[in-house]
Each structure stands twice: as C-alpha cells, then as structure tokens.
Image: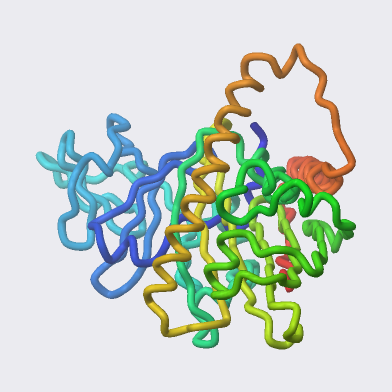
Amino acid sequence: MNWLKNVWYVAGFTHELDQAPFVARTFLGQPVVMFRTSDGQVSALRDLCPHRLMPLSKGRRVGDELQCGYHGMRFNAQGACTDIPGQTQIPAKACAQTHPLRVRHGLLWIWMGDAALASDDLIPDVHWNDDPMWTSSIGYHRLACDFRLVNDNLLDLSHESYVHLRTIGNDEEESIANYPLKVTIEGERLVRAHRDMPNIDPPPFFAMVLKHNGPIHRWQTAINMLPGINMTDVGVYPVEKTKDEAHMMHVMHLLTPETETSTHYFWTVARNFDLDDEALTGKIQAAISATFDEDQVVLEIQQKQLEAYGSAVPNVAIRLDEAAVRARRLLEQQVQREQQVPQTVLAPLPLL
C-alpha cells in the first residue's frame, strides 16, 4: 500500500517509555523500537540489527543503549554502533536507521518519511489532552484492518444506532441518520461532518456522564485530518439548560497504519466537566473502550470480507457515505502528490 509518509503519526503515549526499557511497534510496515534515555531524550530506531537483522527489541537495554540479543552489538540513541564484541573497528554501515520522534501533549509522534522534512511545526495541535482545563481518559486498540476502514467508520456515525445501541447510540427512531448532515472540506487534508440533534433521549453513556435521564440537546462533529487524525467533538446538555452549560468531550481517534491490514488505534477522551472526579474518568475509559470493542468486531469482519469477496462484489455507496468518500479522495490525491513531489509536506489544520 502507498501511505503518506511525510506527516507525523502517533507512535504511542509518553508514559509507555517510562514503564518499559523500550517499546517495539511496526509503523507503515517498518519495525521500530523506541526508548527514552536517562537525560530524557526519546529515540526511535529501526528495529533491525544491521548484522543479521535480528530485532533489537529481542535483545536488552544496557544503560542508554540497545544491545542485540544475537551477537551483542550495541547501538546508542542516534543509531550509531558503539561496540562489536571481538573487534575494535566499527564499519561505517554498522548503524541502525533512526526516525524523528517527538513528545507533545502526552503523545509520541513519529515521522516515517524524509527526516529532513520533519518540522516540529507540523505536529497536529491536540493540546486538550494535557490542558489543565480538561481531563482525559486514554486507551489503545490494535485493529486487524486497513486504517482507512476506521476512518470510514469514524466519519459516518450513523452506525451508532446498530453497533453501539448499548453505549453511545440512540434507537432507530432517534438515529442520528435522521438528522441533517453538513459536510465541509477545509484545505488539503480536513473533512468535517456535523449534526445537531435537538430534544432526544440520552443514550446510556450520555445519561451516565450527565447524571440525567431526561431529554437532551446534542451536537456531534466528526473530523478527519488525513491521514489518520480523527476527532469526534461532542456536546450534550439537558433541554432545560443552555448550550453554554453543555458537557463537552473531544474524543481523539489517532490512527497509525501498522501494516496494510492492521492499525494502531490510540484514543483519548478529553472532557470539560467534573475534572477532579477520578471515578468518572475510570467509568468513561471503560465505557469508551467497550464502545471501541464493538467497532473492532465490525471492522475486523469487514476486513476479512473484503479480502475474501472485495474484488467480486461491487461497493454500493449511500448518502451517509459522503464524508468518508470525500476523505478517501483527499487521501488518494495527497498520496499521489507526495509520490510525484517527494518533498511535499502537509501543514496541520485547526481541528476546532
């Protein structure tokens, strides 16, 4: 598959490097091992020893270096080989490729393309993840599906009434599909799909966070900044209150392709209410994780069906696919552009 490479992808949560000597993951089909040195520097190396291609993550950490578990060669945070047992001369080619890795807003961001183009100014702004005016719940799912299927899922939330009826969805009578959808394109990489849902019954999740079972007003905006930065901006409030009193949540769905048929799904749920309620933070984390478990079942079945029958069965688009179709077109255009002009980079756009 042809992926966009000259963009920042989420590689993990920053706390992961505090809890383990190193973290190994595959991004865009490339194996990577990440670690933090004793002085706080973060590093991402290609997870292959240049000698016999043994994953460095199968070895061990020695101080601020990684030692291959096969023949003991050691590599520092810059990818340079510092020691080869049995010899003093180190060949110039005995190095591990590095990838730019940054820390921002509680997340690790990795650049899999041309390192010379990796400007920190291109990292998307998701500041509410560590903003003191917001409190966040976080989580991770590994999905056995093409990341584009997840983008499709997040841009067409009408499935809530069928996949998520026990969590965030209303029944068919009040399905969000019944409310007008406004889709807009912004710049070269952002699709926005907005709905207002006045005077509806609260789904179970929103009844829980509002501590209110009566009718509510709800808005919901699905935002995709290609290739895989997604946000669901949600606001809910009882009908007897005003929009200024709404409980708001910014749900980030941060997708990084692992392979053509698997995806890293890092998610955060930032809220502007009950900031010190740790019990609520835990409840939201559990509820959202359960919601994404429901998505995972559907998406992984869809991936298997596409592999088995995709070339034989025509894909029928419906009106509710508008945002997803437009996002796919944008992505295809930008991938082609990057292939034609390898120095192409995409500036991030404001999500809100």
Quarter location, residue 245? bottom right
**Relative image position of residue 81 (x, y in whole percent):** 27, 50
Q: In which quarter of the image is the C terminus?
A: bottom right
Quarter location, residue 314? top right
Question: What residue do we see at 80% from left, 57% from top?
Answer: 191
Q: How many labels does the image show?
A: 0
**Relative image position of residue 109 (x, y in whole percent):** 51, 61
Q: Is residue 103 visible?
A: no
> 172 and 75: which one is in front?
172
> 157 and 190: which one is in front?
157
Q: Is residue 292 visible?
A: yes
**Relative image position of residue 131 (x, y in whole percent):** 52, 83
> 297 and 92: which one is in front?
297
Q: Is residue 280 left or right of residue 151?
A: left
Question: What residue do we see at 49% from left, 78% from top?
Answer: 135
Q: Is residue 226 left or right of residue 38?
A: right
Quarter location, residue 64? bottom left
Q: Furthest-front residue in view?
A: 214
Question: What residue do we see at 57% from left, 60% from top?
Answer: 204
Q: In which quarter of the image is the N terminus?
A: top right
- 284 versus 271 height, above or below: above
Colouring rule applied to residues: rainbow
Q: Furthest-left residue in view?
A: 86
**Relative image position of residue 305 (x, y in whole percent):** 63, 21
Question: What residue do we see at 18% from left, 48% from top?
Answer: 60
